[in-house]
Image (cartoon, rainbow, N blue to C red):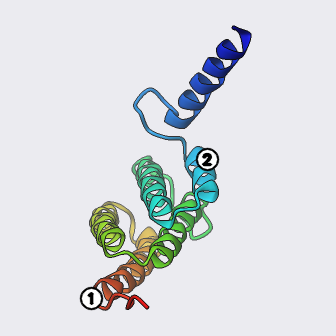
Amino acid sequence: MRAAYRGATIGLLFIVLWEGDCGGRKDPAVLEQAYELEPNPRKRADLARDLMDQRLETLGSFLSSGTMLEERSPRLGNYLAALDRLETAVREAAHTGTSKRAEIHLRRHLNRLENFKLTVSVLERSVLEELIARLEEVREEVLYSIMFPPEAG
C-alpha cells in the first residue's frame, strides 16, 4: 500500500514539475533537462521548439517592460541557446517532417522578432537585427536540408 502511495506521489510530483505553472506551460529548466535526457532527436527538436517559445515570450516581456536590451542579456543568451538546441536536433534528426516543422517555427519567430524590432529604440535594434540574422542562417540551413535531404545509404 505504501509503495503504491509513494509511486502515485512521485508521479504527481513529476506531472506538476513537468507542467510548470497552471497554464500548462512547461518550465524552461524542465524543458532543458528533458532535452538533455531525450535520446530521440525528433523529440529533442519538439522540446527545443517549446523551449524557444518560452524564451521568446520571456524576451518579449522583457522588451515590453521598457528595459534596455543588451548583447550580454541573459534573456538573449537563453534564446540563442534554445536556437542552438533546435539547430542541433534538426541536423541530427535528418528527417523532412522535423525540418519542415522547424522551418515553420523559425519563420513565425522571425515575424515576431521583426515586430519586436519595430517597438524598441534604435539602440536596441542592432541587437535584434543580429538575432534575426542568426535565425535566418538557421532557417536557410533547415530549408536546404528540406530541398536536398540526405540520401539513405
Q: For marks 2 and 1, give the one nearer the viewer.
A: 1
Of residues 51 and 72, which is closer to you in this image?
Answer: 51
Quick one: which residue is furthest to the top in this view?
Answer: 1
- Residue 19: percent from the left, percent from the top? 49, 34
Q: Image quadrant of residue 6?
A: top right
Would you say 101 lies left or right of 87 here?
left
* Quadrant (top left, top right, bottom left, bottom right) of the C terminus: bottom left
Q: Which residue was labeled with disc 2?
A: 29
Q: Image quadrant of residue 142?
A: bottom left
Quick one: which residue is furthest to the right in this view?
Answer: 2
Of residues 1 and 93, which is closer to you in this image?
Answer: 1
Residue 115, above or below 99: above
The residue that appears at 64% across and 55% down in the rendered structure is: 37
Label 2 amino acid?
Ala
- Residue 23: percent from the left, percent from the top? 40, 30
Label 1 amino acid?
Met
Q: Which residue was labeled with disc 1?
A: 147
- Residue 12: percent from the left, percent from the top? 57, 23
Distance of label 2 from label 1 (alpha carbons): 34 Å
